[in-house]
Image: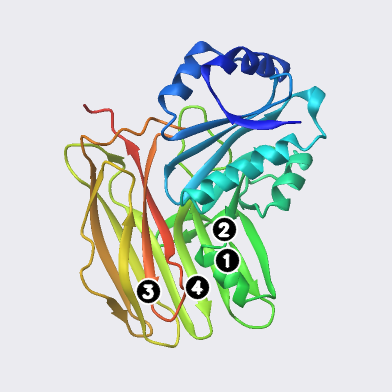
């Protein structure tokens, strides 16, 4: 029997043995980090009846609605017993229970075994390298509580495609992926900021920076543009949201709600609905800064992510999501 438990210092020796079997290094410094960051980082272990650690995964829960699943591993002698499946299921369960309705992870291009596992749970490729015979890819999963799932429920004959090359949206080069109906012009395209793989010293957290929707005459194109690169506690950082009506009907964004992590202050939220005639567009400017209450440690990326929830009338029950990201400043 395998149990899934959260990491505690008493499991350090067992985790070290697992890492050694995987050809990786484990240190007391990493264990200390896991313990200190446990408010935002959950390290799940698969433990057998002999209390041996035979599997491990890290779940980062800092920037709603995104949860990152990191470094899923199973001891070589215990593979084929459903341990990876159990760890992944627990990650999804915990993420969903805490409102992280978009899960994402990185895997190798040639790791077919992992692809089979992740695809079984609804993960799809979103950011691909230019060459598909090497490197890493980012996979995303959208829960039933997202506008993506709503679109797919109402557009059953939609095919999915992700581009290996970046596409220009609002003067930015982003990775484009999405669904198009085989029976109409209806479509949903997502534009992702990020890079294939996870650079050791640079890079930005993968996120949705643009959305294009056309469904039954209602259409809109949304994009976020960061005017600032970094975010800190001194001067506010700035980003813009642009919403364009590309459909045949008048539309209204009833409200815009920021989904910011604790300790991030947001300014510029519109007090009234944004109404757009066909062909019309609106650009809104927002500010953000860290306060003394901000305490999230650096996770896989040194990116502070702020998501806007757009409630569009006559579109979806769930909000459309677009996200800005800033490098955390080293200022005090």
The disc, 1 or 2, on the residue closer to the chain's N-terminal end is: 2
Q: Residues within 10 Å of mark 1 (few under 14, many from 20)?
A: some
Q: Which mark is residue 244?
A: 3
Q: Nearer the viewer, residue 273 or 303?
A: 273
The disc, 2 or 3, on the residue closer to the chain's N-terminal end is: 2
In the structure shown, which secondary structural element does the residue marked by tag 2 occupy? loop
Between the residue at mark 2 and the residue at mark 3, the CA separation in whole angstroms equals 26 Å
> What percent of the width, then of the height, locates residue 192?
50, 54
In the structure shown, which secondary structural element does the residue marked by tag 4 occupy? strand
Left or right position of 20 against 259: right
The disc, 2 or 4, on the residue closer to the chain's N-terminal end is: 2
Q: Quadrant of the N terminus?
A: top right
Q: Which residue is mark 4?
A: 213
Location of residue 157 with respect to 238 vertically, above or below: below
Q: Residues within 10 Å of mark 4 (few under 14, many from 20)?
A: many
Q: Are marks 2 and 4 in contact (CB under 8 Å)?
A: no
Q: Which residue is mark 1?
A: 149
Q: Which mark is residue 143?
A: 2
Q: Quadrant of the C terminus?
A: top left
Q: Which mark is residue 239?
A: none
């Amino acid at each position: 029997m395998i149990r899934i438990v959260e990491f505690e210092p008493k499991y350090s020796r067992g985790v070290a043995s697992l890492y050694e079997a995987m050809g990786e290094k484990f240190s007391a410094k990493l264990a200390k980090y896991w313990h200190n960051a446990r408010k935002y980082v959950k390290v799940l272990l698969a433990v057998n009846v002999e209390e041996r650690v035979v599997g491990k995964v890290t779940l980062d829960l800092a920037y709603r609605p995104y949860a990152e699943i990191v470094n899923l591993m199973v001891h070589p002698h215990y593979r084929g017993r459903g341990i990876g499946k159990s760890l992944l299921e627990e990650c999804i369960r915990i993420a969903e229970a805490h409102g992280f309705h978009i899960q994402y992870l990185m895997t190798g291009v040639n790791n077919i075994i992992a692809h089979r596992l992740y695809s079984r749970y609804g993960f799809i490729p979103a950011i691909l390298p230019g060459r598909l015979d090497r490197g890493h890819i980012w996979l995303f999963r959208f829960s039933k509580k997202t506008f993506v799932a709503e679109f797919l429920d109402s557009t059953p004959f939609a095919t999915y495609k992700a581009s290996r090359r970046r596409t220009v949206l609002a003067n930015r080069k982003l990775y484009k992926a999405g669904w198009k109906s085989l029976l109409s012009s209806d479509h949903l395209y997502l534009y992702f900021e990020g890079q294939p793989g996870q650079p050791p010293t640079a890079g930005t957290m993968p996120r949705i920076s643009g959305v294009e929707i056309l469904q039954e005459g209602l259409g809109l194109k949304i994009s976020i543009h960061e005017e600032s690169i970094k975010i800190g506690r001194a001067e506010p950082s700035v980003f813009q949201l642009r919403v364009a009506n590309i459909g045949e009907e008048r539309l209204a964004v009833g409200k815009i709600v920021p989904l910011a992590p604790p300790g991030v202050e947001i300014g510029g939220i519109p007090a009234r609905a944004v109404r757009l005639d066909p062909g019309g567009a609106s650009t809104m400017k927002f500010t953000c800064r860290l306060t003394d209450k901000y305490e999230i440690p650096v996770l896989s990326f040194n990116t502070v992510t702020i998501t806007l929830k757009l409630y569009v009338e006559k579109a979806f029950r769930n909000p459309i999501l677009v996200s800005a990201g800033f490098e955390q400043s080293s200022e005090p």
